[in-house]
Structure formats: structure tokens, C-alpha cells
């Protein structure tokens, strides 16, 4: 009998705040570094950003001996393939993932879902209702805050705590934090969030360019990749590991 697989989404209805980036970083960290068996459902129709990233990563590995050796050494050490990325529309996400899991010989620990940035897209709300946990990145911008709070409050009111659904909670966390503004500005915003009884993670993600570093022809250390975990040299000071340790604790992984 197969174990129950956790369904997790980094989700928000405001674009450009990091939901796809954190989906990839979390999947790669848990699959390649921590030994969990992970899959990703790319439901961000029609651009399918994570699937497109996998194509770029694969092409770079196939054409560059430096990355080809990295991939070979990683496979030799872990003896596991890259995690699968399955594309589908949001309305077909749960049916598709359940069919995939039932037909796989592997027992998957966790599936991450990358969904479109609006609950009004067909199937998004239904898919979110089938998650075990939702994590929502926010940035200290008034428009982003208003949009994110509206999203989080709707999810909290409609889906969390419903005995008929599996969703156990939605958690917010700060992304792109400017250290110079952190104290006063973030205290004000956090007070507002607290008044709405929305839970916040303790980890702050700093505003740093390393979160955009993919595989490149320059052969620089990789941070965001579907084939490799974030390079240890770049992880230091990024708060990525702290974030994922906190998330792993919350989801009982």
C-alpha cells in the first residue's frame, strides 16, 4: 500500500513575488539534498515556467561538459533521477496527479504545485482546496500586500479548517526583504497581518540577485535549477535553508 503524498503549493495571486522560484528551490533541495522523492505539477498555464526551465537546464547539461560532469557525479552519488515535472491545466491538476501517483512505481513524499497567479482562473480554487499546505511569499509593497492579504484571507475563510477538505493551513513569509527598511516598515505590516489572524513564518528572505541565478554558459555557481540543488556557496546568507527547514517542520516532513 502506497503512503499518502503531501500536496504543497507556493501560491499567491500577485505575479513576480517568487512562487515559481520557491517551488523549484524547495523541490530541488528536498529531492537532491534531503533524499525525499519529489514531483512538480506545473499548472501555470500557458507559459509552464518550470517545464521551460527544465528544458533550458537539460539543454545546458547536454551541451556543456562542465554541467554534464556535475549531473553525472550527482546521479552517481544519489542514484536517483531528476524529479518529474508534469504539465497540465489547473482544472485537471488533481485528477492528473492522482493518476500519475497511482501509475508510478515510486512512493512520492511530496508534490509541489505551481498554479496561475489568480484564484479566478478555472480550476485554481479547486486545486488549492486539495493542497495540504499553502505557502505565500509577500513583499513590502502596498499593492502586493493588498492583493496578498485578499488572497490569504479568502483561502483562510473558504478552505482552511473545512473538515471536508485536506488543507491544513496557509502560511505567509517575507520575500525580497530590504534590510535597511526591515525594522519599522515590516513591524507595521506584520501588525496588520496579525490583526487578520494570518500565520507568518519566522524566516525572512533577503533581497538578493542570487535567487535569479540559473545554469549559464559562464559556468558560475547555480542557485535556481530543476536539475541541481542550490550551490552551497550561494545558500549561505540567502535564508533559503532556514526557510525550507521551517517549512519541513510545519508539514511534518
Image (spheres, rainbow, N blue to C red):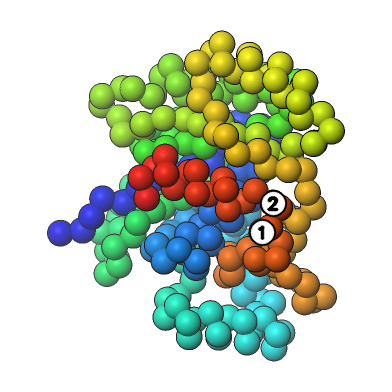
Residue 57: give x, y in percent of width and height: 65, 71
Q: Which residue is mark 2?
A: 238
Count of residue discs: 2
Q: Which residue is rendered at x = 26% and y = 50% of the image?
A: 4
- Placement of 132 over or under 237, stated as above or below: above
Q: Which residue is rendered at x = 76% and y = 29% of the image?
A: 182
Q: Quadrant of residue 200?
A: top right
Residue 22: give x, y in percent of width and height: 60, 49
Q: Which residue is rendered at x = 68% and y = 42% of the image?
A: 205
Q: CA distance from mark 1 to mark 2?
A: 5 Å
Residue 219: give x, y in percent of width and height: 77, 77
Q: At numbered mark 1, what does the secondary structure look like: helix, strand or loop?
A: helix
Q: Residues within 10 Å of mark 2 (few under 14, many from 20)?
A: some
Of the pair 233 and 88, the residue shown nearer to us: 233
Q: Which residue is rendered at x = 62% and y = 51% of the image?
A: 240
Q: Residues within 10 Å of mark 1 (few under 14, many from 20)?
A: some
Q: Which residue is mark 1?
A: 235
Amino acid at each position: 500500500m502506497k503512503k499518502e503524498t503531501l500536496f504543497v503549493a507556493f501560491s499567491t495571486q500577485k505575479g513576480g513575488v517568487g512562487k515559481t522560484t520557491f517551488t523549484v528551490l524547495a523541490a530541488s533541495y528536498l529531492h537532491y539534498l534531503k533524499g525525499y522523492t519529489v514531483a512538480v505539477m506545473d499548472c501555470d498555464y500557458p507559459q509552464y515556467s518550470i517545464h521551460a526551465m527544465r528544458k533550458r537546464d537539460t539543454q545546458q547539461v547536454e551541451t556543456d561538459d562542465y554541467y554534464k560532469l556535475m549531473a553525472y557525479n550527482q546521479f552517481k552519488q544519489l542514484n536517483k533521477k531528476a524529479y518529474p515535472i508534469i504539465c497540465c491545466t489547473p482544472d485537471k491538476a488533481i485528477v492528473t496527479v492522482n493518476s500519475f501517483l497511482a501509475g508510478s512505481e515510486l512512493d512520492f513524499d511530496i508534490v509541489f504545485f505551481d498554479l496561475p497567479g489568480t484564484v479566478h482562473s478555472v480550476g485554481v480554487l479547486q486545486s488549492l482546496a486539495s493542497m495540504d499546505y499553502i505557502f505565500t511569499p509577500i513583499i513590502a509593497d502596498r499593492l502586493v500586500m493588498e492583493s496578498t492579504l485578499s488572497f490569504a484571507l479568502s483561502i483562510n475563510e473558504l478552505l482552511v479548517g473545512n473538515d471536508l477538505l485536506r488543507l491544513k493551513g496557509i502560511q505567509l513569509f517575507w520575500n525580497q526583504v530590504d534590510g535597511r527598511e526591515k525594522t519599522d516598515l515590516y513591524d507595521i505590516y506584520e501588525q496588520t497581518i496579525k490583526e487578520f489572524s494570518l500565520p507568518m513564518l519566522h524566516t525572512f528572505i533577503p533581497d538578493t540577485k542570487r535567487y535569479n541565478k540559473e545554469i549559464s554558459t559562464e559556468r558560475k555557481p547555480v542557485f535556481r535549477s530543476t536539475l541541481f540543488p542550490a550551490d552551497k556557496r550561494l545558500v549561505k546568507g540567502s535564508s533559503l535553508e532556514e526557510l525550507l527547514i521551517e517549512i519541513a517542520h510545519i508539514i511534518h516532513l
